[in-house]
Image: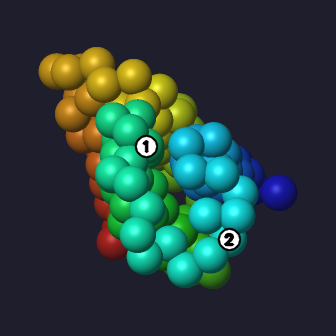
């Protein structure tokens, strides 16, 4: 399998892990029965859960764009060192972004975010050049 597709799979797994951690924390805070119910009157999420909710939304937005780029590159037969680098940059910076976001470390979170955008830019540039 191409590096780009492998990084897409790894990114999807990372997204799933983020969702599962968030769900586990919700069950820990509210109990399984409350989480299995309508969830209309749950207490305010903890700070960590709020961060993970924002992280989930952020990852979802970026994963859609990354998936489109990787799949278009694959379908167009555009795979080279630049697209592979872009895919690796995306995945590893998103992994770092997730850790930094969860722990609430300021300042460096946007650096990882913009680095992941750079990874997507590398792939998009190769598609547009093809």
Instruction: Residue under label 2, please give it.
Output: 36
Position above or below: 63 against 110 = below
Q: Are marks 2 and 1 in contact (CB under 8 Å)?
A: no
- Residue 28 location in percent, x, y? 63, 41
Q: Nearer the viewer, residue 7 or 29?
A: 29
- Residue 2 location in percent, x, y? 74, 55
Rendered-image quadrant of the C terminus: bottom left
Left or right: where 122 falls relative to 106: right
Question: What coloring was used for the rendering?
Answer: rainbow
Q: Residue furthest left?
A: 107
Q: Secondary structure at mark 2?
A: helix
Q: Residue at x 33, y 35 (%)?
A: 47
Distance, label 2 to label 1, CA atoms, is 17 Å
Q: Nearer the viewer, residue 69 or 38?
A: 38
| Nearer-N-terminus badge (2/1) | 2
Q: Residue at x 43, y 43 (%)?
A: 49
Q: Secondary structure at mark 1?
A: helix
- Image disc number at residue 122: none
Rendered-image quadrant of the N terminus: bottom right
- Residue 126 location in percent, x, y? 41, 61
- Residue 19 location in percent, x, y? 59, 54
Q: Residue at x 43, y 62 (%)?
A: 42
Q: How many marks?
A: 2
- Rate crowding at label 2 as few (under 14), some (14 to 19) or many (20 or more) other CA atoms within 10 Å: few
- Quarter of the image for residue 104 reads top left
Position above or below: 48 against 58 = above
**Can see residue 8?**
no
Instruction: Residue under label 1, please give it.
Output: 49
Q: Residue at x 38, y 61 (%)?
A: 57
**Can see residue 27?**
yes
């Amino acid at each position: 399998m191409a590096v780009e597709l492998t990084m897409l799979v790894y990114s999807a797994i990372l997204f799933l892990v983020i969702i599962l951690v968030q769900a586990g924390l919700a069950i820990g805070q509210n109990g399984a029965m409350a989480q299995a119910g309508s969830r209309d009157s749950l207490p305010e999420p903890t700070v960590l859960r709020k961060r993970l909710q924002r992280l989930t939304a952020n990852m979802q937005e970026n994963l859609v764009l990354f998936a489109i780029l990787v799949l278009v590159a694959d379908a167009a037969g555009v795979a080279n060192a630049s697209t592979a680098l872009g895919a690796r940059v995306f995945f590893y910076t998103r992994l770092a972004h997730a850790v930094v976001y969860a722990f609430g470390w300021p300042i460096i979170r946007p650096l990882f975010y913009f680095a992941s955008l750079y990874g997507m830019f590398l792939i998009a540039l190769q598609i547009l050049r093809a």
